[in-house]
Amino acid sequence: MYNKVIRRKLKERLLKLDNRQFKLFYGMLVHYWVKNKYFISSQNFLNLWCELNYLCSEVDESFPDPYDDCELLKSYCQAHPYYFIDILEPGLITDLFCKYLDDRLNILVAILDKLTTGDLRASYEYSNKALGLNEDVDELVVESLEHLKTYEKPGGKKILI
């Protein structure tokens, strides 16, 4: 029962994000997965990535064929780290995230609550506390915003730091 309730909350919060907020959330998700393997198992991360790539290739003919050239696909994904958010419908992305995210979902819901108010700093502060980490929040905020600025397309809500 808890799993269904928390997944419903996760879906509700994800659907509230605009594209820019979703990109910041994805950046946080990747950061905590790479550093600590939080929020999604390695197998589910691979499954999510493969499904996103397949769907992007179906929607956008300029997207590399995920079954044709692995190096081209990797290169594309590195050059466009938020590609799927710009290509796919938000509801579809949300459904996939809800399907594959499988760890500490209650923390993700709280992070999303803070992001939907535009408070990236509060999201990182909460994450640090909830996950028992001691990362430099100022540095994380600056890195997140700089990364997003490097790769973002115009539009989206202003995120407060």
Image (spheres, grey):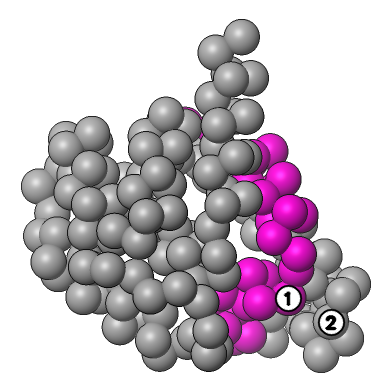
| Residue drawn at (88%, 86%) of the image | 61
Query: Is 61 on the left-hand or right-hand side of 131?
Result: right
| Residue drawn at (63%, 70%) of the image | 85
Q: Amino acid at mark 2?
A: Asp
Q: Amino acid at mark 1?
A: Ile
Residue 84, picture quadrant: bottom right
The answer to whether one can see residue 74 in this image is no
| Residue drawn at (25%, 44%) of the image | 127
**Which percent across, then down, holds residue 136?**
10, 60
Query: Is 70 on the left-hand or right-hand side of 12?
Result: right
Residue 84 falls inside the magenta stretch: yes
Query: Is 26 on the left-hand or right-hand side of 114?
Result: right
Q: Secondary structure at mark 2?
A: loop
The answer to whether one can see residue 91 in this image is yes
- How would you classify the magenta stretch by its main secondary structure? helix
Residue 132, picture quadrant: top left
**Which percent across, then down, holds residue 152?**
49, 85
Q: Which residue is mark 1?
A: 87
Check whether the beta carbons of the residues at disc 2 and disc 1 lie within 8 A of each other.
Answer: yes
Q: Which residue is mark 2?
A: 60
Q: In which quadrant will I find the N terminus? A: top right
Bounds of the magenta segment: 75-103
Separation of disc 2 and disc 1 at Cα? 7 Å
Work out whether mark 2 precedes mark 1 in sequence or the reverse, and give the earlier one.
2
Q: In which quadrant will I find the C terminus? A: bottom left
